[in-house]
Image (cartoon, rainbow, N blue to C red):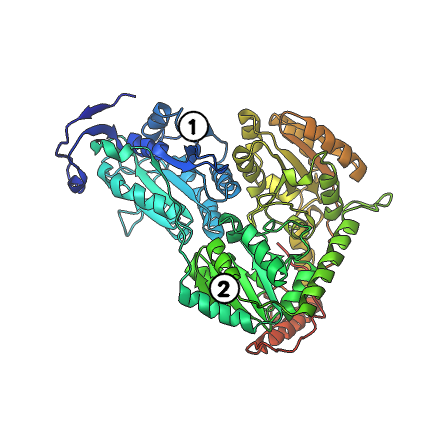
């Protein structure tokens, strides 16, 4: 691999700041890019099957080459292409989404890196970095950067800041990175790479890491300690519970009569599902799931009361509104979970989270700890405490009723000449599995579908439900499906996506074909942004600029888009179906296919599942010429007043009725 072992030597590079790292013993002379790639390839992780074998921590590097990374990092990736595979993509944001989904599908135990050139390639990463940041998911970004020497400034695609000569376009990644470093000398990798790895593998810190790589530094050689590249087994870090915090949580639970567990994504990432299920069963506590936590309990677990919040089930939301204690495990408690902080009206909240920032939310009593460790300790130390028998019985009854209602909603009674809606499509997709539907992974991100899937998709095990709703990023769906399939090639990955998201980002269909990573993509075509169209009208607005029919148009009018033909042009198999019965038949053909298969179906943009839901705060204008807006503002003010009258919860707080729960938007 064009490298040589030499005795340790003093670096003579001008401005050298890393000589202190030159350890005694053999060294290997590598460029910074070669050293970075070799270090990443050396990181190992224990296999998830418990066999004792190891596998690479990094599943590969997605790369789109340009002048900022092809000569330096590209050459290094070629040398180590067998140890660290390089995958070509078609859009920088999309390939970063794929890398994020890969990590999510591996419950943060494996990950990928992404490299781009400088300029638009690098700035295309900002949205994906924000998505990884919000969702607490590991992602290593390696954008090319300008020359440290500045001799050829300004280079092609360089952003010049008139007030700071040290800035580049990559500085836009700082607010959306958990750790950012610009490598201005090869020796800096000796400190930057271990720091980066710690952030990527620490539950309390986890998120995107950016290492900006100036072009000249990528190509500069240095004598690295050979020991730096010794293969090593990565340990994942999460805090153990502190006894004082556990004692406070136990005291709070001991006073509770009507507790509810909220299972967030941290339950999946810490492998805490069994612990949560055991605690719920032993203590009679119902469990509600966030978008990120759905699948923590099997959908048919007797105490699983379903989705929570704005997109939640009536069972979960009724219990959350009446609960006197919320045990929030591994959740950020964002506004869709809490109904914009209006749902937990009478409850003390106990926040169990490896990330202290998240554990504190909703004025919670904090247990900063790994979810599995904390839940296990709570279960062991609760003595003979249980939830009130009537509360547990009611939860069991509500959960059973909701499961029966889901069965009704997803078994279409489609009438002639009536377009299906999302629930009809979801039911058809799940019925199409000849094996257990738990073998499928459903992937989605934004629009109406996450609400319907959160309520209606039957996730039988952790990982079966892969919906990105922390950032609700349109365009994640197909790219995310690719990442999930690369992580779980043995599973059927089904991407459910609206026409709006499809049109925003679809190029990784071609990548999936090229890599042999077969997806089933179901496109629900409602001719526009149906979700926001409904939200717009709920806020008193006129239908405007969302559905094609309500948009400015030229003399030819809005296009009639043939999604099946488009997918075929990217190398996939595809067909359009006219109804739910045809969809079920097409799903069988898609499951039997050996390459990515797209099915499109026309759906109703107005209809949604009316069951469940909760208020979501969307600010309505105080002044408007439209009567509908003024009326919506009155309703908005009424809800704000209700929330502001929230009293400090007590263990015996009276129940209030929720009489106007409503579904939310994107």
> Residue 546 location in percent, x, y?
65, 50
Total numbered circles? 2
Q: Nearer the viewer, residue 550 or 333?
A: 333
Compared across the picture, whether 640 is left or right of 270 comes to right
User: To which residue does mark 1 refer?
Assistant: 85
Q: Which residue appears at 85% of the width and 43% of the height?
A: 417
As drawn, 130 above or below 1: below
Q: Quadrant of the C terminus?
A: bottom right
> Residue 179 location in percent, x, y?
35, 49
Compared across the picture, whether 416 is left or right of 632 comes to right
Q: Which residue appears at 65% of the width and 41% of the height?
A: 438
Q: Nearer the viewer, residue 172 or 230?
A: 230
Q: Nearer the viewer, residue 284 or 62?
A: 284
Secondary structure under tag 1 reads loop
Give the residue furthest to the right.
Answer: 416
Task: Give the spatial CA distance, label 2 vs label 1.
Answer: 47 Å
Compared across the picture, whether 654 is left or right of 24 comes to right
> Residue 328 location in percent, x, y?
53, 61
Q: Can the viewer see residue 541 in this picture?
A: no
Q: Which residue appears at 57% of the width and 60% of the height?
A: 262
Secondary structure under tag 2 reads helix
Q: Earlier in the sequence, mark 2 or mark 1?
A: 1
Q: Quadrant of the N terminus?
A: top left
As drawn, 439 above or below 384: above
| Label 2: few (<14), some (14–19) or many (≥20) C-alpha neighbours in 10 Å | few
User: To which residue does mark 2 refer?
Assistant: 381
| Label 1: few (<14), some (14–19) or many (≥20) C-alpha neighbours in 10 Å | some
Give the residue furthest to the top.
Answer: 2
């Amino acid at each position: 691999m064009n490298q040589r072992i030499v005795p340790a030597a003093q670096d003579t590079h001008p401005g050298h700041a890393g000589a202190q790292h030159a350890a005694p013993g053999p060294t290997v002379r590598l460029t910074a890019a070669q050293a970075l790639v070799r270090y990443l390839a050396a990181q190992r992780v224990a296999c998830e099957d418990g066999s004792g074998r190891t596998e690479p921590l990094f599943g590969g590097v997605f790369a789109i080459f340009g002048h900022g990374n092809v000569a330096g990092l590209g050459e290094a990736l070629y040398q180590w292409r067998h140890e660290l595979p390089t995958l070509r993509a078609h859009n920088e944001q999309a390939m970063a989404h794929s890398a994020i989904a890969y990590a999510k599908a591996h419950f943060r135990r494996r990950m990928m890196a992404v490299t781009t050139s400088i300029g638009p390639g690098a700035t295309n990463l900002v949205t994906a970095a924000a998505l990884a940041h919000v969702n607490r998911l590991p992602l290593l970004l390696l954008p090319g950067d300008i020359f440290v020497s500045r001799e050829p400034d300004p280079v092609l695609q360089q952003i010049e800041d008139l007030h700071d000569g040290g800035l580049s376009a990559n500085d836009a990644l700082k607010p959306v990175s958990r750790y950012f470093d610009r490598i201005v000398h090869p020796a800096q990798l000796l400190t930057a790479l271990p720091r980066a790895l710690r952030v990527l593998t620490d539950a309390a810190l986890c998120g995107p890491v950016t290492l900006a790589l100036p072009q000249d530094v990528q190509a500069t050689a240095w004598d690295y300690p050979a020991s730096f590249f010794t293969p090593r087994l990565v340990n994942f870090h999460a805090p153990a519970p502190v006894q004082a915090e556990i004692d406070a949580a136990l005291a709070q639970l001991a006073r509770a009569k009507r507790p509810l567990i909220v299972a967030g994504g941290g339950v999946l990432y810490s492998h805490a599902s069994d612990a949560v299920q055991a605690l719920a069963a032993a203590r009679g506590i119902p469990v509600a799931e966030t978008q990120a936590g759905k699948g923590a309990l099997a959908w048919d677990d007797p105490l699983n009361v379903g989705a929570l919040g704005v997109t939640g089930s009536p069972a979960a939301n009724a219990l959350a509104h009446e609960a006197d204690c919320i045990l929030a495990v591994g959740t950020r408690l964002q506004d869709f979970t809490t109904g914009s902080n209006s749902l937990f009206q009478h409850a003390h909240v106990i926040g169990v989270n490896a990330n202290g920032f998240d554990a504190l939310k909703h004025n919670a009593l904090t247990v900063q700890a790994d979810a599995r460790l904390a839940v296990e300790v709570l279960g062991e130390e609760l003595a003979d405490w249980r939830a009130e028998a009537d509360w547990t019985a009611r939860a069991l009854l509500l959960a059973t009723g909701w499961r029966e209602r889901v069965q009704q909603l997803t078994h279409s009674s489609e009438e002639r000449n009536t377009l299906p809606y999302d629930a009809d499509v979801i039911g058809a997709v799940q019925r199409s599995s000849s094996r257990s539907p738990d073998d499928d992974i459903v992937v989605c991100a934004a629009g109406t579908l996450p609400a319907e899937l959160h309520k209606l998709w039957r996730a039988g095990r952790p990982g079966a439900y892969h919906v990105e709703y922390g950032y609700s990023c349109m365009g994640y769906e197909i790219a995310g499906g690719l990442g999930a399939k690369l992580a779980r090639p043995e599973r059927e990955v089904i991407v459910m996506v609206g026409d709006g998201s499809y049109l925003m980002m679809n190029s990784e269909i071609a990548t999936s074909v090229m890599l042999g990573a077969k997806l089933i993509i179901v496109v629900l075509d409602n001719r526009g942004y149906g979700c926001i169209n409904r939200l717009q009208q709920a806020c008193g607005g006129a239908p405007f600029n969302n559905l094609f029919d309500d948009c400015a148009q030229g003399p030819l009018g809005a296009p009639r888009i043939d999604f099946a033909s488009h997918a075929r042009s990217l190398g996939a198999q595809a067909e359009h179906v006219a109804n739910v019965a045809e969809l079920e038949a097409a799903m069988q053909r898609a499951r039997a296919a050996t390459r990515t298969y797209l099915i499109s179906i026309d759906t109703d943009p107005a209809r949604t599942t009316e069951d469940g839901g909760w208020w979501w705060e969307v600010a309505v204008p105080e002044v408007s010429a439209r009567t509908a807006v003024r009326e919506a503002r009155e309703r908005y003010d009424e809800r704000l007043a209700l929330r502001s009258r929230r009293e400090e919860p007590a263990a015996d707080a009276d129940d209030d009725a929720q009489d106007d729960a409503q579904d939310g938007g994107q």
